[in-house]
Image: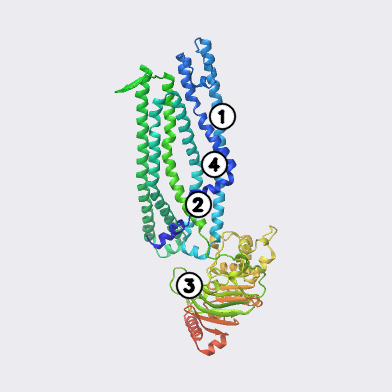
Amino acid sequence: MSADDDNGGFADVREEVDGHPMVGLLRYARAYWGRLALGIGSSITTRLARLVPPIIVGAAIDRVINQSAEPGLLADLGLVTAAPATTTAARLGLLQRLALIAVIAYLVRSVTRFAERYLLEATAQKIQRDLRNDTYDHMQRLSLDFFANHQTGAMMSILNNDINQLETFLSRETRQIIRVVATVGGIGAVLLVMSPPLAAIVLIPVPIIGYGSVRFLTWIEPKYKEIRESVARLNSRLENNISGAKVIKAFDRYGFERERVGDQSQAYHDEQIAALKIRRGFFATIRLFTGLAFVGVLLVGGEMVITGGYTLGALSLSSGITAGTFTMFFLYLRRMYSPMRRIGRTANQYQRAKSSAERVFGLLGHEPTITPPADPVTEPIRDGRVAFDDVTFSYEGRGENVLSNISLDVDAGETIGLAGETGAGKSTLVKLIPRFYDVDSGAVSVDDVDVREYDLQHLRRHVGVVEQDPYLFSGTVEENIAYGDLSTLDGEGIDSRIVDAARAAEAHEFIADLPDGYETQIGERGVKLSGGQRQRLSIARALLNDPEIIILDEATSDVDTETEELIQASLRRLIADRTAFVIAHRLSTIQDADRIVVMADGEIIEEGPHDDLLAAEGAYADLWEAQTDDDDDAAELPALDD
């Protein structure tokens, strides 16, 4: 299995479950113990009420039709008279009494069945809601390395498929477990009272089926683990392909992706077929044992009715049974083995739920690598001084350092331009400031406080970040700009701060030209906007909260030169009184920075103002010259006719 498959399937997370995964599910159920207790009590009452009609049928056959002198179970319980019904009036009176008992039983069953289903299913929905909310919240608080190592499709599979699987198990299979226990226990008790020998024939298969169910769980468990992993991998593949539809079309890779999806679908198909063979074989075995019990009751019970006893070789039973009891045994036989057959499906669903619970509670047990200290600093960040002190950093799973022994002091209000080839470590360096990652050695400080001592959310509220590929949410322009400060959405028109931030990012003019202005829906990831428009919105979003530190990571890479010049003019005014880190592929973007830091292979090789670096004729001068030559070459190209 490839590393991609492992990540998609969350195999590493499953190992982090604290104890048995289904115990974690019970912990969530504990908050609703009152509703659950009432629901379970109603379920048991429902099952016991279902035992009454066969007893009434048996009593009607014996006492009303055949006029037997045997008082029967209902008479022993005091529900009907023990005296034989010898006259027509007495027989009709007894029949009416039996009908009244049946009405009461059906009424109780109807009420308790409603209470059972409502309480248990509603409670399952509440547990599903709580579990999904907690899982989502925990997932959001995990560090960025978790999202880098696990695929979005697999995360969605946990939040949807796995949690839905647990809700299904709670709402349906809990009732089935109660049904088996109450029905088998109640019927077994009644049958033993009526005829112990015949009851033995009915009850002998019960422990065999129970043992078989345990063995079935052992056989099917690894299959369902593989199935859940396969579902996650298939979801990840589909999510990747749907998100990358534009690239697939551009490179005409329909056949290649169809083959990859086909391989994942085939793997899922094969694992399902393997589990299906075991499952159907188990169910067929249960039906065989129920059939044998039916034949046994038919032969033995029939002879006991006809001859008053049963003889098989040396075995001889002198006790007989009535026709009503014989009929009642067959009615109970059907009712008893129906839930016994259903327990196989319950065992099947249990394994599915257990596999899902391993992933859900494994995720909940996965701790973030970036955590706030026990006593975090929450004092306001006023100056925005930043210092890197001998910083070394490497990403998890990579052998080489991305940053090596970086030391850099940045004064409050200073603008730092970061230059260097792709992979030099520029973006990684600035990600250490809001503590998206922690250093391996050394320290990063803001206002002379190590960032590891700050409260995480407090620190990040003072750092505005605009990345090269900005992420916008499906919603309106207003909602996306205001995302970092929801207090601006007062429901009474567009907040002036949003408009000011949009003007500062040179976004107000194009927003005003949109069909609904600031209320325009921009689609998933801002698909209805151009790349430059998306970046200007993300800049406005970062500026809204007036952060002390601004990080612009290739923030103007997708805008045209004219728009870039407008944005730069606004940014120069806005960053005058705050600390700014500007990463730019086009060096012209950072030539006015207070200081330019040039990086290569995770180290600082040069730093200083633009003019000083050009005069030094070092790495920065080479980069500047190369870009200037490219611009001159582009300018000399002939214009294309419209």
Q: Position of residue 579 (x, y in %)?
A: 62, 76
Tag of residue 121: 4
Q: Nearer the viewer, residue 634 or 477?
A: 477
Residue at image point 57% right, 36% down = 115
Q: Amino acid at mark 3?
A: Ser
Q: Amino acid at mark 2?
A: Asn
* Sequence-first disc among 1 and 4: 1
* Sequence-first disc among 1 and 2: 1
- C-alpha distance separating marks 1 and 2: 37 Å
Q: Amino acid at mark 4?
A: Glu
Q: Amino acid at mark 1?
A: Val
Q: Is residue 495 left or right of residue 214?
A: right
Q: Which residue is mark 2?
A: 160
* Sequence-first disc among 1 and 3: 1
Mark 3: secondary structure: loop
Q: Nearer the viewer, residue 577 or 520?
A: 577
Q: Mark 4 and mark 1 in contact (Cβ < 8 Å)?
A: no
* Sequence-first disc among 2 and 4: 4
Residue at image point 57% right, 87% down = 611
Q: Position of residue 277 (x, y in %)?
A: 34, 44
**How was this image coloured?**
rainbow
Q: Residue furthest front?
A: 314
Q: Which residue is mark 3?
A: 394
**Callout in the foreground (3, 2):** 3
Q: Mark 4 and mark 3 in contact (Cβ < 8 Å)?
A: no
Q: Mark 4 and mark 2 in contact (Cβ < 8 Å)?
A: no
Q: Position of residue 594 (x, y in %)?
A: 60, 82
Q: Is residue 446 left or right of residue 419?
A: right
**Callout in the foreground (3, 4):** 3
Mark 4: secondary structure: helix
Q: Which residue is mark 1?
A: 108
- C-alpha distance separating marks 2 and 4: 18 Å
